[in-house]
Image (cartoon, helix red, strand yellow):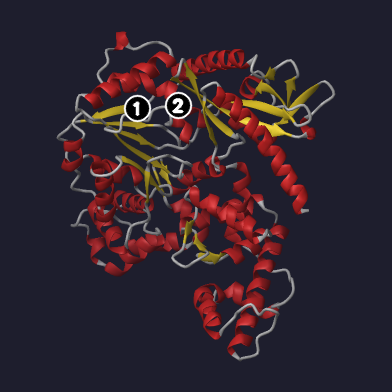
Amino acid sequence: MSGRVTQSRRIERAGVNALRALLEDHDQIVQEIDGGNDYGEDLFVMLTKDGERTGVAIAIQVKSGNKYKRAHSYAIPVEGHANDWRNGLLPVLGVVFDVATKQLFWANLTECLESSEEAPSWIVVPREQELNEDTIQSFLALTHKFVEARSQRRVEEASLHVTRLPGTSGASPRFVGRKQEQQAIRNMLTTMGRRVLVSGMAGVGKTSLVDQVVRHHDVSTVFSGGVIVADMHGFSAHRTRMASPGIAYGPLLSVLGVPSDEIPRTAEGQAALYHRTLDTLGASGNPVLMVFDNVAELSQVAELLPRADAHGVVLTSRSRLGILEGIETINLDCLSSEESDVLLTQILGSEDQRLHAPGPIRDLCALCGHLPLALSISAAILKDDVDLTTEELLAELREEKGRLDVLHFGDTAVRAALQVSLARLDCAMRDPFCRLSIHPGSEMSEQAASAVLGLSGPQARSILRRLSQASLISRSSATSRWRMHDLVYLFAAEQCEATVSHSDRQQAFSRLAELYGQASLNADLTLRGTPEGNPPQFQSVTEALSWFDLECANLQLQHVSLAITISPNRHTPFRCT
């Protein structure tokens, strides 16, 4: 089996390597797309002309092997990628590598899908569209023309909000906490590489933190050219609202002070002027801090990053965005108990009598998971309804199945924010994310995740890592353990109940119960001095005690305890919610 897997992987790599070599030989900038952000593309290509970047980029799906070969053509499967390839930020091209002849053939997948009312299962790649040394320039010209036209249509349909902060704006006195993170970002912007990515789950306060930092006197002093903020709409409810470089160049040039009649009409011309303007500002001692907020994909900002080191860059995203050279990352967690209390006080006002009962307020913060978005919604509900007591709101929030319904005020809702995060997740990761909620505890080991998902340890670990990159789970302080925020867990459980069959949920929970039952038995036997197995699961009494300490909370959950008691060593159906 392992030989076949290795051979398959070798064939896949051969196609990617052949295409990459051809493109790079013709001065195109190529980067392989990070798996955690894969929407069915293998390469991210920034197109160049006469040695200069044009501001135009594409994604390429590469397929290698005989299964893509037809009698008189080739074909690429669409699978679950139709919407992303048709409406995504970048146009997607498909390339098939014929292993026998070592030839490359291409098709414009986005163009094919845009011209089809219903998405086909396969897209034909004609033999006439070979990609080689003789046809590469024609390929680049056709691709460039298509991207320019598509970008122009998106510019006409979309709008991008870009602002320039006044140099003396000052920090907000109402901002709560994050002193350590504020100092770290200021240091990165003023004394280090000047490029920072702030990542974290939906509603954790990334934008507010960055807004606070960039208004600080130390930062505004360094960036005398000003602070420019662009909302890239990466996590808008609709993918078509996502801003691309083609949409961003015009508004950014306007804010940088370029008169509208001097801004070129083409994306290529705008890109060249944008970078020349930034280069001039950097060389004249007027560095600019560029803030790109709500970035979902690397492709949204790769062409917008300043070339001059003098300028600063801050990105905010729910995703780690893959490989970004020279960028430091700050991963933002939820507020502390004390900070949560202060945030509620600031929103409600210290004169609100409901704040004088510390117990209920503490419980309210805990049920909100100390998530700033949830805390702000709860405070808004209390402020809007002066007759609502904290205890009454607590009673609503304690109903787990209705908690996300309660955390909704006006157009703001925790569930809506998480739905967008799920929609941006690679299709292959959505089902595992939902199934992880079958584990009832707030923290799980990689072995427990493997049991719930029904996958091998390495497969489960890879999925956990990719979900962490999307800020839907996070690493625990203990080795090889992961945690899911309470509100994310409730959302995942909703999705699991809606998309995973009852029998599948039962089977997953049975595997988990068997894992815990067998491990509990092995740990107990080790403590009694009679370990079983060759080798035994636990090598020492200390190791067995450590396992019990880590899993104590999970083992004490009522339905886990009952499941282990009924069936420690065999699958038995359990009621799984």
Specify which label sits upstream in the sequence, 2 or 1. 1
Q: Quadrant of the C terminus?
A: bottom right
Up the image or down, 529 lies above or below 359; here it is: below
Q: Which residue is mark 2?
A: 244
| Residue at 29% from the left image edge and 23% from the top image edge | 279
> What kind of residue is marked 2?
Ser
**Residue 166, position as x, y percentages in the image:** 19, 31
Q: Quadrant of residue 251?
A: top left
Judge left or right: residue 36 versus residue 120.
left
Circles 2 and 1, Cβ within 8 Å, touching? The answer is: no
**Residue 17, position as x, y percentages in the image:** 63, 33
Q: Which residue is mark 1?
A: 161
Instruction: Find numbered disc 1 in the image and state the secondary structure of the residue it sits on.
Output: loop
Instruction: Please identify the residue farthest to the top as the structure is shown.
Output: 261
Up the image or down, 402 lies above or below 328; here it is: below
**Residue 209, position as x, y percentages in the image:** 29, 46
Instruction: Find numbered disc 2 in the image and state the secondary structure of the residue it sits on.
Output: loop
> What kind of residue is marked 1?
His
**Number of the front mark, 2 or 1:** 2
Up the image or down, 393 lies above or below 28; here it is: below
Distance (Cα) linking label 2 and label 1 = 12 Å
Q: Residues within 10 Å of mark 2 (few under 14, many from 20)?
A: many
* Depth order, front residue of 407/6: 6
Q: Is residue 446 visible?
A: yes
| Residue at 60% from the left image edge and 62% from the top image edge | 449
